[in-house]
Structure formats: structure tokens, C-alpha cells
Image: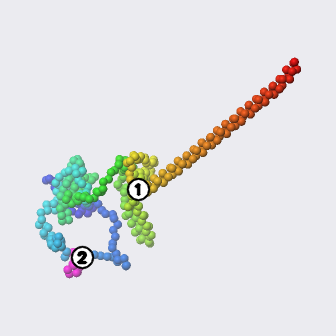
């Protein structure tokens, strides 16, 4: 990799010659500006606004613009006279735990390469000392004409350096947090925890830029002879009042399905008097459900009444049938008794 800066690491009285190389690169697809009418390139030319003519790089200098718009010329000689001890040195000033570095301060990343064979031993010494201490080194260095702050840490077997913003360059987050009073219930936190656990961890190496790939495919298709650009999917969920609990439950369910897991999301029972405010859609849905429930109860009541009436009718019919059967039995017994009596009377007369 091509170095962008040569110098040394100052580690107490130890000096380590190093080369600075970029640790990252941009993979974004870049575009050129063209004239839409004929496809001609649009180029920027540096023009002096006083003489209204183009000037070359050799004629261009620096200036500081004052608050009233006055331009104060600054030459390279002016800057060279300023004391800048870190012009060619990465000066380590302290060793601190990595947790003390605010991620908001971290800027570009670089690799530090040992410059020459003599630098191998002190370079390795610093690397192993950082590993064993489990700390990072805070350093000052100069790059592109100004002094900067840096953080040195070990990545595999290489010392890496992150450019850091100065503490006074970090803005206070005033007015950024929600200004309204919001209460988050335990049930909502439980569902948020469940969603986080379901999404789990991810291998960062598996993530890629889908948009960049789509742009590259579109360009390749255009080169081959034209392509129909698909319409962008409609944006959903913006500016709508959502049911947070329902959204969390749906998110957990979708995450489980994406991971191939089964099982329904546990429903959270709302305590009386502590339910979340309902949206108009939720109120409408609740009213509809109440109507359906009332209709079902009415139908069930009618069905029960009909069943009771049928049972009563059957009972009455059974009682009548039993009464008729009893009456017939009684009549039969009476007839038999009369017949027996008639037969017995003549026998007594014959005997007399």
C-alpha cells in the first residue's frame, strides 16, 4: 500500500520510524456531471473573480476570511515559522483504557508500518506493550498542515491509528432528545428485549451494500443495451401513529420467521387502567369486536332458549303419553274385573 506520510513514533526516548497508510477505502460508485442535452462533461475551472480569467495551480495561494469578509493572505512561509513539534512525529502523550474514548471522536483510520529493519524491534515492543496493558495510546501528530489527535491500538499484528476530533469539536446534544414527557412500560421493554434477543448477533463480514450492487447491475445492463429501471417501493410507516405493542410483537414474529424459528409471540395482558392510548384505528377495531361479541352472546341466548323450550315440550309430551298409557292400563284392569264378576254369579245360582 502506498504511504501518505513518513515520520516516527515518539515513545518516551524511543523513536520508531514508520510509514502511514490508509486503512480504509471508499467503494461507493461515483458519478460525473454532464450536460443533459448532449452528454458533454461539466468541468469546474478556477477563475479569479477580479480579472475574470482562469488561473493555474501555481498562482493559487491561501487566505483566511475574517468575519466581515476581509481576506487575509497566509503564505507557506508564514505557516513554516509556527512551532509544530509533531510535523514529522507521532508523539504519544498517554495510555488510557479504550472505554475512555468517545466513539463520536473517532475519524479516519490508518495503519502504521515499520519503516526499515531497525524499526522492527521497537515497533514490536510497542505493539506487545499495548496488547499486554489492554490500553490504547493517545498521541498528537500533524497531517495536511494541521495538528491532530490520534489513538493507537493493535489490530491483529499491526498498530493502527485512528484520527480523533479534539474534545471541543464535539457538539453538545442540546434540543436533540424528545422534549415531551414519555413513560415506557415494563411490558414494552420486555418486548424490545425479546426483539433484540431474536435478532441476535451478526457477522459483520456478511453485510454488504445492496444499493451499490443495484447501481452496478443497472450500469452493466445499460452498457449492454438499455434497462428499465424498476419503481422504488412505496415508503411505509412514516407520519403514522402506530400501536407500539403491536409493532413490537409483529417485529419479533417477523424476526423469528426470518431466522427459521417457530412459536407465537407471547401476548402481553394489559392491566386495567394502565393500557396505552388507542389510535382511531384501534378504537374502531375494538368497537367492531364488541359488536361481534354482543351478537354472538345474543345468538347463544336465543339458541339456549330454543333448546329449553324443546326440552320442555318433549317432557310435556312424555307426561301425556305416560298418562294415556296409565289410563289404558286402568281401563283394561276394570274390564277384566267386571268380566270375572259376571262369570262368578251364575255359578252361585246353580249351587243353590
Determine the image quadrant of residue 172: bottom left
Whether 57 is among the magenta residues is yes
Determine the image quadrant of residue 326: top right
Residue that appears at 81% across and 28% down: 339
Q: Looking at the figure, which quarter contains the C terminus?
A: top right
Q: Residues within 10 Å of mark 1 (few under 14, many from 20)?
A: few
- Residue 103 horizontal/vertical position (percent): 26, 55
Numbered badge on residue 279: 1
- Residue marked by disc 2: 46
- Depth order, front residue of 73/344: 344
Where 198 sits versus 108, above or below? Answer: above
Where 228 sits versus 13, above or below? Answer: below
Determine the image quadrant of residue 341: top right
Which residues are the magenta region? Answer: 45-58
Residue that appears at 20% across and 57% down: 167
- Residue 179 horizontal/vertical position (percent): 29, 57
Residue that appears at 17% across and 70% down: 67
Where 341 sits versus 228, above or below? Answer: above
Whether 47 is among the magenta residues is yes
Amino acid at each position: 500500500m502506498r504511504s501518505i506520510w513518513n515520520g516516527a513514533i515518539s515513545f518516551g526516548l524511543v523513536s520508531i520510524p514508520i510509514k502511514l497508510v490508509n486503512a480504509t477505502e471508499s467503494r461507493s460508485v461515483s458519478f460525473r456531471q454532464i450536460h443533459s442535452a448532449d452528454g458533454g462533461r461539466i468541468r469546474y475551472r478556477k477563475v479569479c473573480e477580479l480579472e475574470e480569467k482562469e488561473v493555474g495551480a501555481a498562482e493559487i495561494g491561501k487566505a483566511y476570511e475574517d468575519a466581515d469578509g476581509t481576506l487575509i493572505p497566509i503564505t507557506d512561509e508564514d505557516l513554516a515559522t509556527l512551532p509544530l513539534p509533531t510535523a514529522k512525529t507521532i508523539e504519544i502523550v498517554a495510555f488510557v483504557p479504550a472505554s475512555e474514548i468517545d466513539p463520536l471522536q473517532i475519524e479516519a483510520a490508518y495503519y502504521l508500518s515499520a519503516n526499515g529493519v531497525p524499526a522492527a524491534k521497537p515497533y514490536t515492543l510497542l505493539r506487545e506493550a499495548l496488547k499486554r496493558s489492554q490500553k490504547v495510546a493517545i498521541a498528537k501528530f500533524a497531517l495536511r498542515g494541521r495538528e491532530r489527535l490520534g489513538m493507537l491500538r493493535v489490530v491483529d499484528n499491526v498498530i493502527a491509528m485512528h484520527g480523533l476530533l479534539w474534545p471541543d469539536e464535539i457538539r453538545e446534544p442540546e434540543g436533540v432528545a424528545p422534549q415531551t414527557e414519555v413513560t415506557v412500560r415494563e411490558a414494552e421493554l420486555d418486548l424490545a428485549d425479546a426483539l433484540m434477543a431474536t435478532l441476535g448477533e451478526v457477522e459483520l463480514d456478511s453485510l454488504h451494500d445492496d444499493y451499490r450492487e443495484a447501481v452496478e447491475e443497472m450500469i452493466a445492463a445499460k452498457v449492454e443495451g438499455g434497462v428499465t429501471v424498476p419503481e422504488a417501493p412505496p415508503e411505509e410507516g412514516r407520519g403514522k401513529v402506530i400501536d407500539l405493542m403491536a409493532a413490537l410483537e409483529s417485529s419479533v414474529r417477523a424476526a423469528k420467521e426470518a431466522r427459521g424459528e417457530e412459536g407465537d409471540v407471547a401476548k402481553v395482558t394489559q392491566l386495567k387502567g394502565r393500557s396505552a392510548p388507542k389510535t382511531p384505528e384501534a378504537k374502531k377495531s375494538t368497537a367492531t369486536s364488541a359488536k361481534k361479541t354482543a351478537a354472538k352472546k345474543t345468538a347463544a341466548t336465543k339458541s339456549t332458549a330454543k333448546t329449553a323450550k324443546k326440552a320442555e315440550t318433549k317432557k310435556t309430551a312424555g307426561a301425556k303419553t305416560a298418562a294415556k298409557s296409565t289410563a289404558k292400563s286402568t281401563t283394561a284392569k276394570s274390564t277384566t274385573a267386571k268380566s270375572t264378576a259376571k262369570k262368578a254369579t251364575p255359578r252361585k245360582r246353580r249351587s243353590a
